[in-house]
Image: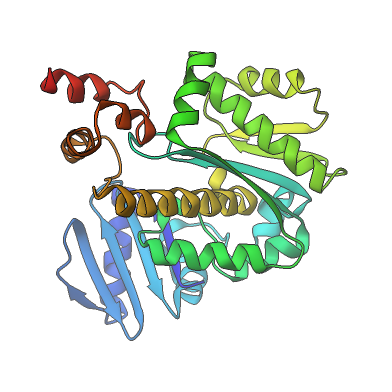
């Protein structure tokens, strides 16, 4: 493990700062942090937003196990994951998506099968929730690790914008469409691992929405849903594979269309959407964006 993040309370931030001072860490200036310090190849940063701690470097695991957990967090989880969360090590599917909140680009839903041995290998390789990974290169590296791990099975569904827009019109509701997508990925995974007993999805709506989608496909599998599902290695792996596919689509389409497609739904997104229309015409917009977003009215309204 070379990277780790965790939320902190105000008191825990103070305890950590005192701990770093006592251990002769060198404090350095870093944007958006309460404080940041380093010692050798280990860096510790506490970000204002959250607040949360980011620990990086060769000695990350030892620092967490012998200092952060016992002296700051007051828990002992590192190395005890199998005791605290035994279900994570049992055979199951993990499902997650990428692109749901981005105006440009596809909706990608991925599913990964893991068991005891696969989970241990992915943990050792540093697989984590994709939202904790800031580099596209790192996402690709972790995705390759997942694909090459013996025993892993996976399936990725990509709804490119044109198909996404058509599918959204059929459902008229994002959560219902997401549930259909999750159920479709689970259906494909069951073809790869028919005896898998359980599936876990990061919860995006009330539980009955996904339960109903599975029932419509007559899929018989125990369904678990929880917020923060990416703490499970299978769900984290699915988030990595989904993000890689999303980033890949964005990069290729940006080059092909001659317009850099930004993430999210900010002012830069509106500007890029206008550029797409100016270069390729009004009809091109539906090929690169999710039209039901309110952003569409901002883009088209300014051009009328």
Spot occupied by residue 111 in the image (x, y as percentages of width and height) = 64, 45
Left or right, residue 54 beside residue 182: left
Spot occupied by residue 248 in the image (x, y as percentages of width and height) = 43, 54
Question: Given the current orientation, which residue lies at the most extreme right position?
Answer: 195
Near-viewer residue (261 or 15): 261
Left or right, residue 72 beside residue 294: right
The residue under the point 62% across, 54% down is: 233
Question: Given the current orientation, which residue lies at the most extreme front position?
Answer: 280
- Which of the image's four quarters has the C terminus? top left
The answer, for residue 69, to whether it is visible in the render is no
Q: How is the image coloured?
A: rainbow
Query: Residue 30 appears in which quarter of the rendering?
Result: bottom left
Query: Residue 190 appears in which quarter of the rendering?
Result: top right
The answer, for residue 46, to whether it is visible in the render is yes
Near-viewer residue (237 or 12): 237
Spot occupied by residue 156 in the image (x, y as percentages of width and height) = 61, 46
Left or right, residue 292 beside residue 167: left
The residue under the point 36% across, 62% down is: 135
The residue under the point 31% across, 54% down is: 255
Spot occupied by residue 249 in the image (x, y as percentages of width and height) = 43, 49
38 versus 172 height, above or below:
below
How many numbered marks, from 0 up?
A: 0
36 versus 172 height, above or below:
below
Left or right, residue 223 beside residue 161: right
């Amino acid at each position: 493990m070379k990277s780790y993040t965790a939320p902190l309370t105000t008191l825990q931030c103070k305890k950590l700062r005192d701990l770093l001072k006592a251990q002769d860490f060198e404090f350095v200036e870093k944007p958006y942090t309460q404080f940041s310090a380093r010692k050798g190849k280990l860096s510790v940063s506490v970000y204002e937003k959250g607040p949360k701690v980011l620990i990086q470097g060769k000695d990350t695991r030892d620092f967490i196990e012998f200092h952060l957990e016992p002296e700051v967090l007051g828990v002992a989880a590192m190395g005890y994951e199998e005791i605290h969360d035994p279900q994570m090590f049992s055979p199951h599917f993990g499902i997650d998506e990428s692109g749901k909140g981005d105006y440009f680009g596809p909706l990608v839903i991925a599913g990964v099968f893991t068991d005891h041995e696969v989970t241990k290998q992915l943990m050792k390789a540093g697989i984590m929730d994709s939202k904790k990974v800031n580099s596209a290169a790192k996402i690709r590296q972790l995705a390759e690790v997942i694909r090459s791990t013996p025993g892993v099975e996976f399936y990725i569904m990509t709804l490119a914008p044109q198909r996404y827009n058509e599918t959204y019109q059929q459902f008229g509701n994002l959560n219902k469409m997401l549930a259909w997508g999750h159920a479709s990925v689970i259906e494909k995974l069951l073809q790869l691992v028919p005896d898998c007993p359980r599936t876990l999805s990061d919860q995006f709506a009330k539980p009955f929405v996904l339960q109903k989608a599975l029932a419509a496909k007559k899929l018989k599998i125990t369904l678990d849903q929880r917020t923060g599902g990416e703490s499970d290695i299978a769900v984290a792996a699915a988030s990595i594979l989904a993000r890689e596919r999303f980033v890949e689509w964005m990069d290729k389409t940006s080059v092909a269309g001659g317009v850099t497609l930004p993430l999210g739904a900010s002012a830069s997104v509106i500007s890029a959407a206008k550029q797409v229309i100016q270069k390729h015409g009004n009809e091109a917009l539906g090929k690169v964006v999710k039209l039901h977003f309110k952003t569409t009215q901002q883009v088209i309204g300014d051009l009328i």
